[in-house]
Image (cartoon, grey):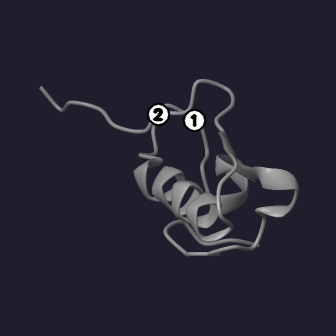
Amino acid sequence: MMIAGQTRMGANAEGGVCKVREFGGTGDDETLDTRALQDAIDSCHQAGGGTVLVTDLMVANRSDD
């Protein structure tokens, strides 16, 4: 189980794919997935490169206008 905002650096960079959902991203249009997206990017960077996989129209940022 993963708590939102928890960091799993390098935990799932095998095969060069870092899945945002595996870093706590929800894609539920309610939760900001910014931290999960950044953690996936950081994990790929630590692994020396790779692909950040974003699925189900995940919300990375929103405006509260």
| Residue 34 image point, x, y percent | 41, 50
Type of the residue with mark 1: Asp
Task: Please identify, in this view, whether the residue under mark 1 or under mark 2 is nearer the observer.
Answer: 2
Q: Quadrant of residue 3?
A: bottom right
Per the image, the residue denoted by label 1 is: 28
Q: 55 and 28: which one is in front?
A: 55
The reply to whether dot 1 and dot 2 touch (C-beta < 8 Å) is yes
Q: Is the residue 17 above or below the residue 30 in the image?
A: below
Type of the residue with mark 2: Val
For label 2, the crowd category at 10 Å Cα-Cα, with few meaning under 14, some 14 to 19 and many 20 or more, is some
Per the image, the residue denoted by label 2 is: 59
Q: Quadrant of residue 4?
A: bottom right
Q: 33 and 48: which one is in front?
A: 48
Q: Is the residue 65 above or below the residue 19 in the image?
A: above
| Residue 60 image point, x, y percent | 42, 39
Question: In the image, 45: left or right of 19?
Answer: left
Q: Which mark is residue 52?
A: none
At 73% from the left and 57% from the top, the residue drawn is 22
For label 1, the crowd category at 10 Å Cα-Cα, with few meaning under 14, some 14 to 19 and many 20 or more, is few
At 65% from the left and 55% from the top, the residue drawn is 49
Q: Residue furthest right?
A: 15
Q: Secondary structure at mark 2?
A: loop
| Residue 30 image point, x, y percent | 45, 38
Q: CA distance from mark 1 to mark 2?
A: 8 Å
Q: How many marks?
A: 2
**Label whose residue precedes the other's in the sequence (1 or 2):** 1
Q: Quadrant of the N terminus?
A: bottom right
Question: In the image, 44: left or right of 35?
Answer: right
